[in-house]
Image: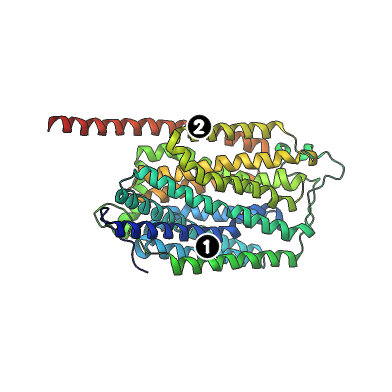
Amino acid sequence: MNKLEDDTDRNNPKKSLSLRSKTYKNLLVISLGFLFLFTAFQALQNLQSSIHNDKNLGFVSLIAIYASLLTSCMFVPPIVIGKLGCKYTVVLSMFGYVSYTLSMFYPRFWTVVPASILLGFSGAPLWSAKCSYLTSSGIRYGKAINVSEDTVVTNFFGIFFLIFQSGQIWGNLISSLVLKPSGGKFNSTGTNIGEICGKNFCPHTSIISHQETTKSTVTTLMSIYLGFGILAIAFVLIFLDKIKVVREEKKRGVCDLFIATLKHLKNTKMQLLIPLTIFSGLEQGFVFGDFTKAFITCALGIEKVGLIMICFGAVDAIFSLVLSKIVEKTGRPVVMILAALINFGLLTTFLIWEPTENTIYIYYIGAGLWGFADAVWQTQVNAFYGLLFPTNQEAAFSNYRLWESLGFVVAFSYGNVFCTNVKLYILIATMILGVTFYGVIEWIRNGEIKKKNDYHLNEMMSS
């Protein structure tokens, strides 16, 4: 495929139209590629803590994924992207996700854990390449049409996450339909559900049992998800154009890129972003590992996981797009504060509420509200990284995946150690710290913008 043009004559209507069509075509291709891939992976992730006969295999698998993802974030993305470029980095990384789905046809520790590690090492370059691709496209397109780069990049991430997060709908719908005939739930043999589920759910609880899903059911589900993974690879390989990443003029070698990833941690803004980025991993880990098991499967049954998580995915997808328009009107801080308030309200509600089969509406409301908050964290934090570090994207997004992955690892590591109420308190504390530091970054950034504008104004007046 031809490279996307780096320079555009904005006074030439034909070139402007060509750039617009190519830019949005590539945005759609990379978004659909991720949709196909994560339709399978996200649904599998939601089921990991509930579907396996060995109750520890699911959590060990998730820990292996995000521990290897955390490790690879430090050096793999800059090296791979520097050698292959964004397009082929995405294609190669997708194979790691497909291998994980393949391991589910015979789920044992010796098959699933190595596949999980491979997936983790594939995840860092996959997401860093995607972020660099969208940010570079947005910056280039914004300059070409004389529109704020901030606005264009935020809008691109919004469109991407609208399509991407809808994978929660399709993947969970598939799992719900396939698992429904053999669905089972944790039962308490006479014990009140509220006493053992939700905030009271603990890994060591011995009075619960799990009804197994049949092997043929799992095979059917995995076959469908495998097809989605193969489709994702073919779609991106055939239709996505290559693009030059917006970076500093100086050409850097592989070692320089690795060092840049480490040096980027010295950046004050990067340091202030760490708590919020960790929280992004923690909150997703809680939804996929704890909410699905302690609240849904425990009280309602595994067949309800897909249906309730569809609500989460649908709201997440819709607001991933809508938020870009809202941010244009209100600014990023307003929606960030709103997401924090909603997450805080949900976390405190989960500390009070005792789940029962008669209050199923609360599951859907809670999942939907969490979907909105997650849409904010995913789109706005991603876009914020791109805007804060436009000339050092590879190192910046490597750090993003590093700290988000740490959040996932922590969430899944203490999944079989702490009771749910302890995890809720950890989430509340991390979120408050992260949002506070985010506010400091916005204050610093606004000061820099004002100083820059004053400088240009003084230059104009003196000339």
Determine whether 167 is above or below 421 in the image.
below
Give me the C-alpha separation between circle 2 and circle 1. Answer: 36 Å
Taking the image as shown, residue 329 lies to the left or right of residue 171, namely left
Residue beneath label 1, please?
Answer: 118
Q: What's the residue type where badge 2 is placed?
A: Ile
Where's residue 204, x and y in %?
73, 44
Q: Quadrant of the C terminus?
A: top left
10 Å crowding of disc 1: few (<14), some (14-19), many (20+): many
Taking the image as shown, residue 357 lies to the left or right of residue 92, namely right
Q: Is residue 387 visible?
A: yes
Q: Residue furthest right?
A: 190
Q: How is the image coloured?
A: rainbow
Q: Is residue 402 visible?
A: no
Q: Looking at the rendering, which quadrant does residue 219 occupy?
A: bottom right
Near-viewer residue (408 or 436):
436
User: Is the residue under label 1 in contact with that under label 2 (CB below 8 Å)?
Assistant: no
Mark found first going from the N terminus, 2 or 1? 1
Task: Name the secondary structure under disc 1.
Answer: helix
Label ID, residue 6:
none
Q: Quadrant of the N terminus?
A: bottom left
Q: What's the residue type where badge 1 is placed?
A: Leu
Label ID, residue 337:
2
Task: Name the secondary structure under disc 2.
Answer: helix
Q: Residue furthest left?
A: 463
Where's residue 139, x and y in %?
34, 49
Comparing marks 2 and 1, which lies closer to the viewer? 2
